[in-house]
Image (cartoon, helix red, strand yellow):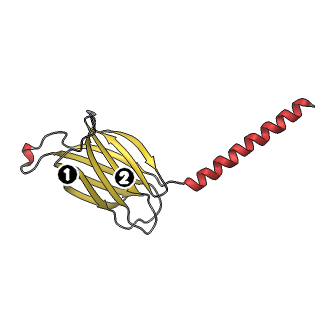
Amino acid sequence: MGAIVVGTKSDKNTTVVGLSSDGKIRVEITTSNPVKSNTMLMGIIFRDSNGGTIKQNVNYDILAMQNGKEILLDLSSHAKDGTGTHVTNILASDEPVNIEVTLLGFGTGDESRWSGPKGEVLMFNVVPEFGTIAMMILVISIMSIVIISAKSKMSLKL
């Protein structure tokens, strides 16, 4: 299994990055955030981790699940230019989505001539952004600290 690195988040999308176990292949997935009753758009890019050039003729499987239910299954996908786009079924909730990408190899034609990692599974977890709620909690926490600090200094002077 490859390593997972959480990338950038915004109110509309999330980017997650995974590395193959040998560290040579970097998989970047940018998704729309999970929203109940909507589909989720996924863009995938396969890069060489040394230099970041996009890999060509990538063969892979992709599976996405939410709450234990399959919302996307594309087997034997081929990304000629190293990029791919996938769309899930309609989501049942705003809950996180788990994505598994299985690397099948690089090349065209006969599978026996494909190179690179074969059968390696990279797992990703896309968690919806709670920007507004997180910001409110942060502001309330900071205000509480300031108020408590101010009261503590006043009681020390008495």
Figure quadrant of residue 33: bottom left
Q: Which image quarter holds the C terminus?
A: top right
Q: Which amino acid does label 2 sit on?
A: Thr
Front residue (pair 70, 153): 153
Mark before the other along the chain sequence, 2 or 1: 2
Write down the residue under mark 1.
81
Crowding near the residue tagged with mark 1, few <14, some 14–19, many ≥20 C-alpha atoms within 10 Å: few
Q: Which residue is drawn at 64% across and 52% down?
A: 136
Q: Is residue 86 left or right of residue 56?
A: right
Write down the residue under mark 2.
30
Q: Which image quarter holds the N terminus?
A: top left
Q: In this view, does 25 lie to the left or right of 6?
A: left
Q: Which residue is drawn at 54% across and 54% down?
A: 130
Front residue (pair 76, 147): 147
Q: Where is residue 132 in the image (x, y as percent from the top left)?
A: 59, 56
Secondary structure beneath disc 2?
A: strand
Q: Position of residue 131 (x, y in %)?
A: 55, 53
Question: How many marks overall?
Answer: 2
Q: In this view, does 141 lie to the left or right of 26?
A: right
